[in-house]
Image (cartoon, helix red, strand yellow):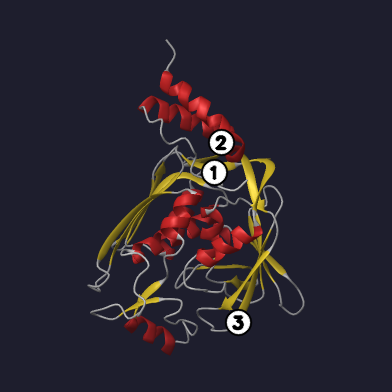
Amino acid sequence: MPNVAFGLWVGRWGDLEMKFSRQATLRSQATVTGVGVHSGLPVSLILGPAPIDAGFVFVRTGLDGCDREVQASAQSVIATEFATVLGDREGPLVSTAEHVLAALRGMGIDNATIEIDGPEVPIMDGSAAPFVAAIDQAGILTQSGSRRFIQVLKPVQVAMGDSFGELRPNASGFRTEVEIDFANPVIGRQSYTLELSPERFRREISRARTFGCMSDVARLWSAGFALGASFENSVVFDESRLLNPEGLRYSDECVRHKVLDVIGDLALAGLPLLAAYRSVRGGHKLNHAVLTALMADRSAWRVIEAETARRSRVYAEASSGMVGMVAPAYSPDVS
């Protein structure tokens, strides 16, 4: 007698296979303008299409008449102190890259150019929502190339003081398990788990804003950082209350923003991950350290194409009796 659950999986898969198995880029260009959170200076960013297997490429313009490109990869990261900074041998090119990268990866984009005329991605409202809106405006185009994944084969762990990060195998897609624990009693301890899909990213994560404590903001200002930070683009707390008059977008907005940062930082793997990522008291530095540790251990991962990923997922889910979740985590929701 045939396995009914397995047959149901295979049958339902047909409607989604093309969307899952092919790479995606943007159909046209879309522009966002704002200010850099650290410089406070105006900056314009243009999201646009890119060829198959291009990945995410930043194009920095306005540098003595010579544009410079940098691949959004772990190897291009040159700083992670206050944000993720990408550069080359000549120095930094793009700061605060994580929010736009989170939007691209979260919405199921594989290839895109990000043209920027200043040293920082505009902070916008402190979330990824404006970049999701730009992706909606540009549209999503399915390409002919097979989608590729980095499949994590064994756990990779990094501990940094009281912070801990781990990537482990997860055949069904990308999963985040993030926990934060701040001394500030208004923030305190929060946790959030997400099985990444465009729908869930849009609804649960994209609008979560960057956050901080007033004492930290004052310290950054005195050091010449966060000159563009304001209540319009940051959630700010003092020792006893939230200072933003409009309140929070989610009751646990802080940990959701940390999930957003994880998605953006791990987009620097260059391909979508088939993995579960657990982070405790983490940040950009820890995220980068775990990704670097993964990339350094060639026995811990492999690159696979969509067909192999599909078979792994079908067999894993069918053997466990889970037949309700048929859409893979990285299926774009616009064809």
Mark earlier in primary sequence (2, 1): 2
Tag 3–tag 2 contact (CB < 8 Å): no
Q: Is residue 69 left or right of residue 186?
A: right
Q: Dot 2, how many residues are within 10 Å of its Cα: few (below 14), some (14-19), or many (20+)?
A: some
Image-quadrant location for residue 144: top right
**Residue 45 horizontal/vertical position (percent):** 64, 70
Is residue 1 or residue 270 the one in the foreground? 1
Q: Residue at x 64, y 75 (%)?
A: 44
Q: Is residue 198 visible?
A: yes
Labels 3 and 2: the sequence-earlier one: 2
- Badge 1 amino acid: Ser
Tell me the quadrant of the picture where the N terminus can be found: top left
What SS does tag 1 mark?
Answer: loop
Question: Residue tagged by mark 2?
Answer: 16
In terms of depth relative to the viewer, which is nearer, 133 or 158? 133
Q: Residue at x 70, y 58 (%)?
A: 28
| Residues at marks 2 and 1 touching, judged by CB atoms closer than 8 Å | yes
Residue that extends furthest to the bottom in the rendered view of this protein: 222
Residues 159 and 115: in front is 115
Quarter of the view holding residue 239: bottom left
Q: Which residue is mark 3?
A: 42
Which residue position is annotated with label 1? 331
